[in-house]
């Protein structure tokens, strides 16, 4: 990270005024982040637990500002959403990730799926499916290698419109997954109606495996029901061998977390793919 002392934003301040002005500073800088090339992507492997092979990568957005330093996504993505900046930024993310994935396939690496986080603000754009189609055409990525991660919050607002959009996306041949499953209100039964192929068990549940009996039971129940409904399951935030063993015993097919790898820059991820080929 580039660092300039003295001008770093203090995120731990509890003072409301300061918080608001920090948000203001962040938003003002975020407006120029794309043009100034301050945004970049990292890739975190998603593993087939049975085969111990990389089958996918989640794309994670990073922002390195010359004055503010490296700003965590939890701090700036909500601001990008409120200001609608997530729409052009999200478009850039999709295009960049699809190009990257196609490039890896073109140099002969084993094809993997690229999973891109999509904000509700993007999904609410009526022409979002057309945009995705254009990006697939332009980058020449086979749609089956693109997955869109959406959060459970979609099941509340504009449900009818969102269902139409999800149907169009599904018809394009891209995969849809529900992120942070378990933290919102959607039921497993609903997911089928939303054209969802896969769900990601939130890391807060994975973290509690063997520690909290209720959450451990929730994890095994989600996996069992997802298997019955023919939904694929990814457990996120796997950090320990114990968590992995539990997930394996309970027939969870895919996993992601620091136990396998932290999110990596494109080059480092490519090296990993080459070694595991
Ligand atoms: P998320 O989609 O739930 O992403 C998973 C987060 O968990 C990532 O944090 C990842 O680095 C972290 N993680 C992965 N493995 C582990 C682990 O074993 N232990 C722990 N403690 N954490 C792990 P990150 O990169 O800070 O992203 C935070 C959130 O920011 C994401 O949560 C997502 O909601 C949002 N975000 C990140 N990139 C994008 C993006 O490109 N577009 C949109 N719309 N949102 C994004
Ligand atoms: Ca995600
Ligand atoms: Ca998640
Ligand atoms: Ca999350």
Image (tube, rainbow, N blue to C red):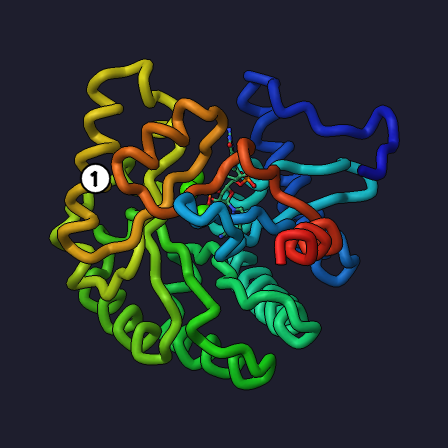
Whether residue 82 is visible, yes or no, is: no
Q: Is residue 188 left or right of residue 139?
A: left
Residue 123 picture quarter: bottom left
Seen at 47% across and 41% down, the residue is 256
List the single residue furthest toward the right.
4
- Image x and y of residue 2, in percent: 84, 38
In depth, the one of 220 and 164 nearer the eye is 220
List the single residue furthest toward the top.
211
The answer to whether mark 1 is within 8 Å of ligand 3 is no
In depth, the one of 196 and 22 nearer the eye is 196
Q: Is residue 202 left or right of residue 184?
A: right
- Image x and y of residue 15, in percent: 57, 18
Mark 1 neighbour class, 10 Å CA radius: few under 14, some 14 to 19, many 20 or more: some
In depth, the one of 35 and 27 nearer the eye is 35
Which secondary structure lies at badge 1? helix
Seen at 60% across and 64% down, the residue is 97
- Image x and y of residue 196, in percent: 26, 61
Seen at 25% across and 24% down, the residue is 216
- The residue wearing badge 1 is 222
Q: Is residue 24 left or right of residue 179?
A: right
Residue 130 picture quarter: bottom left
- Image x and y of residue 267, in percent: 75, 55
Whether residue 144 is visible, yes or no, is: yes
Q: Is residue 146 left or right of residue 37?
A: left
């Amino acid at each position: 990270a580039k660092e300039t002392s003295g001008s770093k934003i203090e995120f731990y301040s509890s003072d409301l005024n300061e918080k608001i002005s920090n948000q203001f500073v962040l938003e003002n800088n975020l407006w120029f982040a794309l043009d100034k090339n301050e945004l970049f992507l990292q890739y975190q492997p998603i593993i087939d637990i049975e085969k111990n092979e990389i089958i996918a990568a989640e794309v994670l957005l990073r922002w390195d500002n010359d004055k503010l330093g490296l700003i965590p996504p939890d701090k700036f993505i909500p601001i990008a959403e409120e200001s609608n900046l997530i729409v052009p930024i999200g478009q850039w993310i999709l295009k960049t990730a699809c190009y990257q994935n196609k490039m890896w396939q073109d140099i002969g690496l084993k094809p993997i799926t690229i999973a891109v986080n999509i904000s509700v603000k993007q999904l609410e754009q009526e022409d979002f499916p057309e945009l995705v189609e254009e990006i697939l055409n332009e980058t020449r990525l086979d749609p089956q290698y693109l997955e869109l991660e959406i959060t459970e919050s979609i099941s509340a607002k504009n449900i009818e419109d969102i269902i139409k959009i999800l149907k169009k996306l599904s018809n394009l041949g891209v995969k849809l997954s529900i992120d942070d499953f378990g933290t919102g209100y959607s039921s497993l039964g609903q997911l089928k109606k939303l054209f969802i192929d896969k769900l990601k068990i939130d890391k807060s549940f994975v973290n509690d495996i063997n520690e909290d009996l209720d959450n451990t039971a929730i994890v095994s129940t989600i996996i069992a029901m997802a298997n019955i409904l023919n939904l694929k399951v990814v457990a996120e935030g796997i950090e320990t061998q114990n968590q992995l063993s539990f997930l394996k015993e309970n027939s969870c097919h895919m996993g992601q977390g620091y136990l396998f790898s932290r999110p990596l820059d494109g080059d480092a991820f490519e090296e990993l793919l080459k070694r595991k080929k």
